[in-house]
């Protein structure tokens, strides 16, 4: 392997590593400045509940499905049938 190829490979590798760190830095900076990180609590101007409103987990995370709402409106079954498992 020639010295030129070795140096070119090292430069390409260094540029790739620098690009990964640059993207990571930009993403972290954007998340911090957005003020909407759930782990940070109340962000500036959000009042806390504004960002979290309507973000309850869906059925795929184990919550009960909305059996009186969507399904009853669509005629799948009535409210008299009771809750579905």
Image (tube, rainbow, N blue to C red):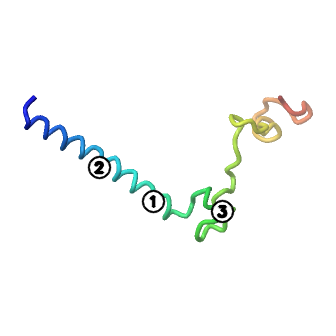
**Along the polypeptide, which appears first: circle 3 or circle 2?**
2
Residue 30, numbered circle? 1
The CA span between labels 1 and 3 is 20 Å
Disc 3 + disc 2, Cβ < 8 Å: no
Residue 20, numbered circle? none
Q: Residues within 10 Å of mark 3 (few under 14, many from 20)?
A: few
In front: mark 1 or mark 2?
A: 2
Image position of 59 with respect to 14: above or below: above
In front: mark 3 or mark 2?
A: 2
Q: Residue 38: image x %, image y %?
A: 62, 56
Q: Residue 81: image x %, image y %?
A: 90, 30
Q: Nearer the viewer, residue 69 or 28?
A: 28
Residue designated by label 2: 18
What residue appears at the point 60 percent right and 66 percent down from the top-left corner?
43
Quarter of the image with the N terminus in it: top left
In which quarter of the view is residue 47 placed? bottom right
Image position of 39 with respect to 56: above or below: below
Residue designated by label 3: 50
Q: Residue 17: image x %, image y %?
A: 30, 45
- Identify the secondary structure beneath mark 3: helix
In front: mark 1 or mark 3?
A: 1
Q: Nearer the viewer, residue 72 or 15?
A: 15
Q: Nearer the viewer, residue 1 or 15?
A: 1
The CA span between labels 3 and 2 is 37 Å
Image position of 27 with respect to 16: above or below: below
- Identify the secondary structure beneath mark 2: helix
């Amino acid at each position: 392997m020639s010295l030129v190829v070795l140096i070119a490979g090292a430069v390409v590798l260094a540029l790739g590593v620098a690009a990964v760190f640059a993207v990571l830095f930009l993403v972290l900076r954007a998340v911090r400045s957005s003020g909407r990180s759930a782990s940070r609590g109340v962000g500036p101007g959000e009042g806390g509940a504004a960002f979290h409103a309507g973000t309850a987990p869906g059925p795929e995370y184990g919550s009960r499905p909305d059996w009186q709402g969507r399904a009853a409106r669509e005629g799948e079954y009535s409210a008299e049938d009771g809750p579905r498992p």
